[in-house]
Image: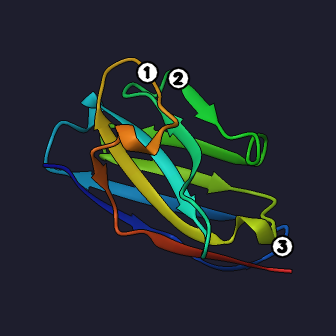
Amino acid sequence: QVQLVESGGGLVQAGGSLRLSCAASGRTFSNYVMGWFRQAPGKEREFVTAISNSGGSTYYADSVKGRFTISRDNAKNTVYLQMNSLKPEDKAVYYCAADFFIGGVFSDWRVYDYWGQGTQVTVSS
């Protein structure tokens, strides 16, 4: 089992920044691909970004490319999501997810076995 706990959400004005963290425990973190997803009220869960187990590969949704950055610190069992130039449409609950896999990244939420409880991000216009 892998336990994931997100933090760092909050209220920010449009154009502002937030950094989300996701702390993992339970298994060897460096064996897991990590993803960030988000879900706004009444909408489907949406892929945001993912990072390979080593951190060598990343993948971003077009909607966040150039504004968001995913990173990980395997020594701290933590993955981060730096969000800059936030827009009102970025408002959602953000979830981190983990899947046991070495060498790749995935955008399909169905691939991921473990999920955090989510953290709310609200962007005011």
Indicate which disc residue 17 carries: none
Name the spot of residue 41 as percent of width and height, x first.
60, 76
In terms of secondary structure, where does tag 3 sit?
Answer: loop
Amino acid, disc 1 = Gly
Q: Residue at x 60, y 31 (%)?
A: 59
Q: SS at mark 2? A: loop
Q: Earlier in the sequence, mark 3 or mark 1?
A: 3
| Residue annotated with mark 1 | 104
For residue 57, which numbered disc appears in the image? Answer: 2
Of the residues shown, which amino acid type is indicated by label 2? Ser
* Mark toward the viewer: 2 or 1: 1
Q: Residue pushed farthest top?
A: 103
Question: Quadrant of residue 34 in the image?
Answer: top left
Query: In the rendering, at what x and y percent does residue 40 appear?
Result: 61, 70
Residue 16 can be seen, yes or no: no
> Do tag 3 and tag 2 residues touch (Cβ < 8 Å)?
no
Residue at 50% x, 50% y is 36
Q: Residue at x 56, y 52 (%)?
A: 81
Q: Are marks 2 and 1 in contact (CB under 8 Å)?
A: yes
Asked if residue 23 lies left or right of residue 119, the reply is left
